[in-house]
Every structure is written in structure tokens, then in C-alpha cells.
Amino acid sequence: MSNIIGITMGDPCGVGPEISVRALADMSPAERQMTRIYGNLATLEAARAVLGIDLDLSPNVVDLPLEGAPLPWGQLSSVAGDASFRFIERAVRDAQASVIGCIVTAPINKEALNSAGHHYDGHTGMLRSLTGSKAAYMLLASERLKVIHVSTHVSLQEAIHRATTERVLATIRAGDAHLRRVGYASPRIAVAGINPHCGENGLFGTEDDDQIAPAVAAARAEGIDAYGPISADTVFHRAYSGAFDLVVAQYHDQGHIPIKLVAFDTAVNVSVGLPIDRTSVDHGTAFDIAGKGIANHGNMNSAIAYARKLVAGRPQQG
């Protein structure tokens, strides 16, 4: 397996090209040698010029065509949406062929992606489709708080329907396996309730008793150190204070809000359950500041660092 990190440039009109170039410039020569950017060289050169960085990008770029490149910064474009899909598609194929060991994704714009005919809810759904995976889970990782989600980009009403015993148990298993891989001997996993106060014995709904509690019991029967359901208004504070290594959140905002409160610039988005490894920045395309040379690349550096940890810790075959 390869230890090369493949960064996908993201939407060519957003901040992805800038943070990719900044991250590459920050690296040591040895790290740079183990890094590729999947994108468009003309766009990356335009970003380099905006940033005032003197660096030969060509040895590190898998250059893919983009009509009219460089496109205007900060504008929604179906051409850019299609390009962002093609960058990811090529990186996925190379990851499947072990040309690269982990994909690090810069932000894409979902509206641009869909206007180009690529109908996905985001990176995770796209990667699941491209790899033929049945399931993939979004894990947000920061130093003191880690959260994995039962569902993400669906309506709140749909999220409640998806919080089945089977899906919650599968999410617990996926989170446990991932944390073991990155060095936790016996991860302590807290499972958030879906209703206020976990339903208060049925006063505020029965989903916690009927769907979530059985999943926790099943996980414990398998030897997973799982607890819950625990009321969502306390579980994240307890995890942040060190009581748990991972929280299973039942839906998008339940997990994203606490992470973005405590680690807005450093949290890494990790896809769990795919046959390939992928980490990502946890922010959007920021069209309002694209092309101004002021985008913060700290989150990209965090995503790359997590990716290097994944490839270094991958079980060796043979």
C-alpha cells in the first residue's frame, strides 16, 4: 500500500486551490515528495500567484483539464462543479489501485456539483457511490472531542426514521473499529439520545427506549465499551471533559454543533467504513474570500496530519 497523500483541489472557484498550495508550501521536501494534488495546474498556479508563493507545483500535481481555467474566483459554476467531481473520481481510482494511500479533500460546493449533474449530498455519499460501498459514516475528529454520525445530510424528520437499532449498532461498530485503528485499545463510546432527556421514560417519545437502547445493549454484548443512550445536552460536555473517547450522534446538527463550537478551525472530517481512506477539511468553499489570499489553511494541515497517521497505522498485508 502507498503512503502517498492525494489532496483533491475541491471547487476551482473556492478556497480549495489556495489552502492546497499553502499546505504544500508548508511541507518539508520529504513530505512534499509523498503528496499529490489532484486538480488543475493552471488554477493552482493562479492560487500560487495570489498567495505570492515561489514553488514549482508541477511535480506534485495530477493535472486534469478544466475549460477556461483559471475560472473566476468566488462564482458558482457548473463547470467547476463537474471539475471537482472529476478530481475526486480520479483520486478514488488511484486510491483503489494503491497509487495513493489516503485522499484529503478540499471543499466542494454541493449546488455546483448538482448543477453539473452529479447528484450527491456531499463527499461522503459520492465516495460511497464511487467505491460501491453499502455504508459510510462521517466522523468529526478533534483533540478533545470526536463524534460519529448515524445520519448526516437528510432532513431532521428523515434522521429520526433512520435511527434504527440496526443503523445505530452499525455506527457504534464503525466508530469502535476506527478508534482501535488509530491507537485506542478499548474505546469508550457514548451514544447520544435522540429526544430531550432520552424521552424521559416515554414522555417525550419512545425512540430512545425502543431503538437506541437495544443497539447499545447489543454493542456491549459484542464486547464494545458502549454507554447510553445519554441525554444529548450533557454527553458532549462529558466527552470533552474526558469521560468518553467518542460520541455517536443521531443526526447532523447534534454532532456538528458541539464540534464546531470547540474545534472550528481544527476538526477533521473522516470517512469511516469505506474501502479507501479519506479525510477532509471541515469547512466550505468560502466563495466570499476566494482568490484574496487570506484563507486559513490550518484545517487542511490538520486533515493532512490525520491522513498521514492513517497511512502510517494501516495494517500491513502479507
Image: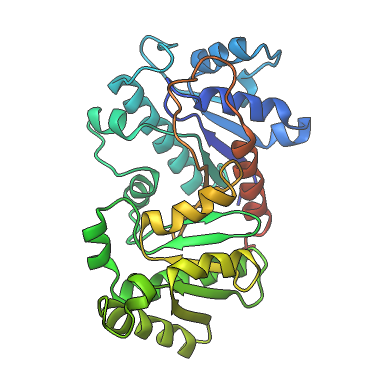
Please tell me which residue lies in front, 83 or 210. 210
Taking depth in this image into account, of 249 and 14 the one nearest to the observer is 249
Q: In this orientation, does residue 175 appear?
A: no
**Eyeballing the image, is 216 above or below 52?**
below
Taking the spot 46% from the left edge, 67% from the top edge, the residue there is 233
Colour setup of the view: rainbow
Outermost residue to the bottom: 221
| In the displayed structure image, the side of residue 118 where residue 90 appears, left or right | right
Query: Picture coordinates of residue 79 (x, y %)?
Result: 31, 20
Question: Residue at image x 61%, y 44%?
Answer: 266
Left or right: residue 50 compared with residue 191 = right
Q: How many marks?
A: 0
- At a point 65% along the width and 30% down the height, the residue shown is 23
Q: Position of residue 284 (x, y in %)?
A: 44, 34
**Toward which corner of the image does residue 64 lie, by quadrant?**
top left
Measured as percent of width and height from the top left, residue 137 is found at: 41, 59
In this rendering, is residue 306 above or below 82? Answer: below
Task: List x then y, in percent, for residue 300.
Answer: 59, 37
> Looking at the figure, which quarter contains the C terminus?
bottom right
Task: Using the image as rendered, state which of residue 160 and residue 82 is in the foreground.
Answer: 160
Q: Which residue is at a point 59% across and 11% down the rendered structure image?
A: 50
Vertical order, 150 against 110 (above or below): below
In the rendered image, is residue 311 in sight? yes
